[in-house]
Image (cartoon, coloured by chain):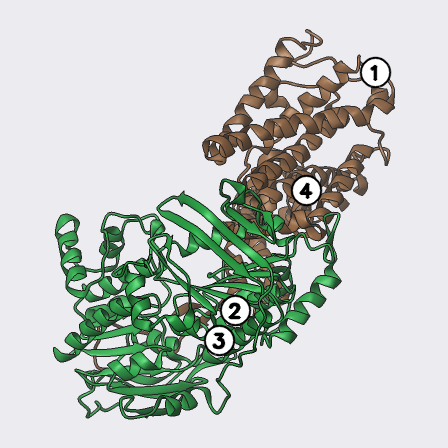
């Protein structure tokens, strides 16, 4: 093979990769030149992650060639990729829960820097890039946002020539994201190449100077995102599909959820809510950066964490603070947690068995401890039919579904029960655009039919789109709720970072 | 170069295939072992495979196999309950001993009855004995977060010593016996033999019924479901409203009761009395751990694995007698089976892929 005659840092030619019968990448031509911030766009399952895994040595292509600085190479391992100067920040974190931040970083960098010297380096980098971390804290105490900061830091510690960022901003505040963008621009100015994977077109247009768009494993276009309209890019990504959510007018009715003087503290997380009242037909949004008590708020509402006194949480006029999840489900309150795999669903279990997970006290499905298999299968079938879950078979394990389809499934599982109250954490995190639209539509129509919904989300656009009222959760404290039209993105961003007095006096 | 790649489709067929591969590996290793350990390897292999038809009466040999199968399967399915939920009870041997002690205690408490109608109560007492013994590590784990692997194992040795103590102390029987033992139960109380001349007795039938009941519970009820949920995802377990501590209690209670029942049946049917531990316990409780994993924690798998291991065990004793091949060959085969079954289990989820090119160097060199 002849060496390539381009100045590209990395170039892929006709890369192909398949898993069993699934084609993840097909004839992919892609290149990044030094100093470029190159966006890689596409829905979930479009093949972005696979392509990046090939570039950073995690997977080997079935066909095609990689060129690094003009020379054909085989990147046989991540270690080799790192040695060559390719760094990657993954969307899904690869951290040892039991180890501290510093230990996790020491593990992954191949250098000899250890102990205090490494800590100093970490803190210096963290300070430079505005990525606040505490080197001694064990990872299991950290939120998703804090974990991602570790991932970013450990890639930066390698001073890579090519840095791949896989949806890095999904858990950052606007201010933090801006700081990251400054970092990225600095890297680019110094001649580094950056690959930026994102679902958020706005940030791509702000940050990137070129973009490659993937759909179903192939390149469907490339453009300069600064001069191409978001509509055009979205159409390339999605094909020509409707992506506008429908909103339905709603009537508010009786009180479905009341929280008063709730104070709790579990492990490192604390939660403090003075008062909150949620009416039928209303969607209430809780904004905030990851790690500010969202997990605990969800657990407190779902009954996975109990609280005292029992009347600090009231669902459908019943005090439930001391009632577990199934007691609350009996009051027609349903819950959708953030983590699809491992919390909302058991990864290796079939969709049928996963349907049972939140139906164990549903008398239609379980009577006297015996599971009515046929009703369960019918139920699973109805969920996938009504919520357009594309799946390879109801008997197949949940982990075989794409993120978007599994999310539609775990949301649909609760919606099918027509809950009086629905609490959902991160309804569309890591979900492709079309599925996200479907999920939001479903939430809106549920509220339209008279249910109260509490949405915890880090996606501000989403909250602004579907919520009626909004409050910000910062360091475990839920600020004052205001109708959505009284908020601005800037005000939210400030409240989320605690820069503004959240308990306004007006 | 060979790499492991995650399968896109995981089906029953892939599982069956990897079980088949494991069986073949086990057989190859067994043949190899017999070649090394025997002067007449061909003879040994043939007799090992067909021993029930070698002796005078086939049903006697098969009876021995089924007898062992019953004990091993009963204990193993109980253990699988906990193993499914990541609760590691490895002390079934001790719970078996306490089941026997419990049964004997029941017999004494009932005032040494003679009639067969006392048998259910005696067996129930055995289940309670095994269950209570198993609840000790459960309580330690729930209250003090103690590692149940250690506590349940240590209780095996305490249970064994307790058994020996009872035989040489408070319940000491015939002083002229060659070993420490209690006075035997009256014959009228012992489960009847089903087929004369064989070891098949009504007690094994009771074990079979217990096995089927527990299998049905695991397969069709919410209890079985919650154990499967608990296996890998404690968060999903709590989300479904199941308490992890209750799972620990239940797993230990069920596995202890099953081992206890096996111990009670063993005492009433096989020995008719308690005997000092080293002459009484046959390591069923430990072999059952292997069986549970060979059977992949699946009831039918456990039954087949128990049969396979029993067949190997009885076959090994047969060729020891017939051909003077040391019966430790059974242990070697058991271990070979465990390794190959656990090893090939990976092939359920992953497939081997042979990549085309061999890399000479790992550096980022130019290929051309």
Quick one: SS at disc 2? helix
Q: Where is mark 1, residue-wise? A: B113
User: Separation of disc 3 and disc 1 at Cα?
Assistant: 72 Å
Left or right: residue A33 compared with residue A30? left
Q: Where is mark 4, residue-wise? A: B73
Q: Where is residue A331 in the image (x, y as percent from the top left)?
A: 64, 53
User: Separation of disc 2 and disc 4 at Cα?
Assistant: 40 Å
User: Separation of disc 3 and disc 4 at Cα?
Assistant: 49 Å
- Quadrant for the N terminus of chain B, please: bottom left
Q: Return the chain for callout 1.
A: B
Where is B62 relative to A446, above or below?
above
Q: Quadrant of residue B311?
A: top right
Quick one: SS at disc 4? helix
Q: Where is mark 2, residue-wise? A: A407
> Dot 2: few (<14), some (14–19), or many (≥20) neighbours within 10 Å?
many
Q: Quadrant of residue B58?
A: top right
Disc 3 + disc 4, Cβ < 8 Å: no
Disc 4 + disc 1, Cβ < 8 Å: no
Which of label 2 and label 4 is nearer to you? 2
Q: Quadrant of residue A111?
A: bottom left
The numbered disc on residue A436 is 3
Q: Return the chain for callout 3.
A: A
* A217 vs B90, nearest the viewer: A217
> Dot 4: few (<14), some (14–19), or many (≥20) neighbours within 10 Å?
many
Q: Position of residue A499 (x, y in %)?
A: 25, 61
Callouts 2 and 4 in the same chain = no
Callouts 3 and 4 in the same chain = no
Hue used for the chain lettered B:
brown
Quick one: SS at disc 1? loop
User: Separation of disc 1 and disc 2 at Cα?
Assistant: 63 Å
């Amino acid at each position: 093979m002849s060496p390539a005659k381009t100045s590209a840092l990395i170039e892929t030619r006709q890369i192909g990769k398949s898993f069993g019968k699934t084609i993840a990448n097909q004839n992919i031509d892609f290149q990044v030149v030094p100093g470029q911030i190159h966006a890689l766009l596409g829905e979930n399952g479009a093949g972005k992650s696979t392509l990046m895994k090939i570039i950073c040595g995690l997977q080997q292509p079935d066909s095609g060639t990689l060129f690094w600085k003009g020379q054909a190479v085989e990147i046989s391992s991540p270690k080799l990729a790192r040695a060559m100067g390719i760094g990657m920040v993954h969307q899904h974190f690869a951290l040892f829960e039991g180890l501290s931040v510093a230990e996790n970083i020491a593990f992954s960098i191949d250098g000899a820097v250890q102990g205090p010297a490494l800590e100093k380096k970490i803190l210096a980098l963290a300070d430079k890039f505005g990525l606040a971390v505490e080197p001694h804290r064990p990872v299991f105490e950290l939120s998703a946002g804090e974990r991602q900061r570790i991932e970013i830091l450990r890639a930066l510690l390698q001073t890579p020539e090519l840095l791949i960022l896989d949806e890095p901003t999904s858990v950052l505040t606007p201010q933090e994201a801006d700081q990251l963008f400054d970092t990225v621009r600095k890297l680019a100015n110094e001649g580094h190449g950056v690959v930026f994977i994102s679902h958020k077109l706005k940030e791509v247009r702000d940050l990137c100077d070129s973009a490659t768009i993937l759909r179903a494993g192939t390149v469907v276009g490339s453009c300069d995102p600064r001069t191409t309209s978001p509509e055009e890019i979205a159409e390339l990504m999605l094909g020509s599909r409707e992506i506008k959510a429908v909103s339905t007018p709603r009537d508010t009715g009786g009180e479905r959820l009341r929280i008063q003087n709730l104070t709790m503290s579990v492990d490192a997380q604390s939660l403090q809510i003075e008062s909150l009242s949620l009416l039928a037909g209303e969607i209430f949004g809780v904004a905030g950066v990851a790690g500010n008590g969202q997990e605990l708020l969800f657990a407190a509402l779902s009954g996975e964490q109990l609280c005292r006194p029992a009347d600090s949480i009231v669902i459908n006029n019943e005090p439930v603070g001391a009632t577990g999840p199934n007691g609350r489900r009996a009051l027609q309150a349903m819950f959708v947690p953030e983590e699809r795999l491992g919390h909302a669903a058991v990864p290796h279990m079939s969709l049928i068995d996963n349907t049972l997970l939140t139906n164990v006290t549903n008398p239609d499905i379980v009577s006297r401890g015996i599971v009515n298999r046929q009703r369960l299968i019918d139920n699973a079938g109805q969920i996938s039919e009504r919520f357009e879950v594309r799946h390879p078979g109801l008997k197949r394990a949940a982990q075989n579904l794409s993120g978007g389809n599994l999310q539609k499934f775990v949301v649909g599982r609760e919606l099918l029960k027509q809950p009086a109250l629905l609490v959902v954490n991160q309804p569309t995190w890591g979900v492709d655009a079309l599925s996200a639209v479907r999920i939001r539509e479903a939430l809106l129509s549920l509220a339209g039919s008279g249910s109260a919904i509490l949405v915890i989300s880090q996606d501000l656009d989403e909250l602004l789109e579907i919520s009626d009222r909004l409050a910000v959760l910062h360091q475990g404290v839920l600020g004052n709720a205001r109708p959505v039209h009284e908020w601005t993105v800037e005000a939210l961003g400030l409240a989320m970072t605690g820069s503004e007095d959240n308990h306004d006096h007006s | 170069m060979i790499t492991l790649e995650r399968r896109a489709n995981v089906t029953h067929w892939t599982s069956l295939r990897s079980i088949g591969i494991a069986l073949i590996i086990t057989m190859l290793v067994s043949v190899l072992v017999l070649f090394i350990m025997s002067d007449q390897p061909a003879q040994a292999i043939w007799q090992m495979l067909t021993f029930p038809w070698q002796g005078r009466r086939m049903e006697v040999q098969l009876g021995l196999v089924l007898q062992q199968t019953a004990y091993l399967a009963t204990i193993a399915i109980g253990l699988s309950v906990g193993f499914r939920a990541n609760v590691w009870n490895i002390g079934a041997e001790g719970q078996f001993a306490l089941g026997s002690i419990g049964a004997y205690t029941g017999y004494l408490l009932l005032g040494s009855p003679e009639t067969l109608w006392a048998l259910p109560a005696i067996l129930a007492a055995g289940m309670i004995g095994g269950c209570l013994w198993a609840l000790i590590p459960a309580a330690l784990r729930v209250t003090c977060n103690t590692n149940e692997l250690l506590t349940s194992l240590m209780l095996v040795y305490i249970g064994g010593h307790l058994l020996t103590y009872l035989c040489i102390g408070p319940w000491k029987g015939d002083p002229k016996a060659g070993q420490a033992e209690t006075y035997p139960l009256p014959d009228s109380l012992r489960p009847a033999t089903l087929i004369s001349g064989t070891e098949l007795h009504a007690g094994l039938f009771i074990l079979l019924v217990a096995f089927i009941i527990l299998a049905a519970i695991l397969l069709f009820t919410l209890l079985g479901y919650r154990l499967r949920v608990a296996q890998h995802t404690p968060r999903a377990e709590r989300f479904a409203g199941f308490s992890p501590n209750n799972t620990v209690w239940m797993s230990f209670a069920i596995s202890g009761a099953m081992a206890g029942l096996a111990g009670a049946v063993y005492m009433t049917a096989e020995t008719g009395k308690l005997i000092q531990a080293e002459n009484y316990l046959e390591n069923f409780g430990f072999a059952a751990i292997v069986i549970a994993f060979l059977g992949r924690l699946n009831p039918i798998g456990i039954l087949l694995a128990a049969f396979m291991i029993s067949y190997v065990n009885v076959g090994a004793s047969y060729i020891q007698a017939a051909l003077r091949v040391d019966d430790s060959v059974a242990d070697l085969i058991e271990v070979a089976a465990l390794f190959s079954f656990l090893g090939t289990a990976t092939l359920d989820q992953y497939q081997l892929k042979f990549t085309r090119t061999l890399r000479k160097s790992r550096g980022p060199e130019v290929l051309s």
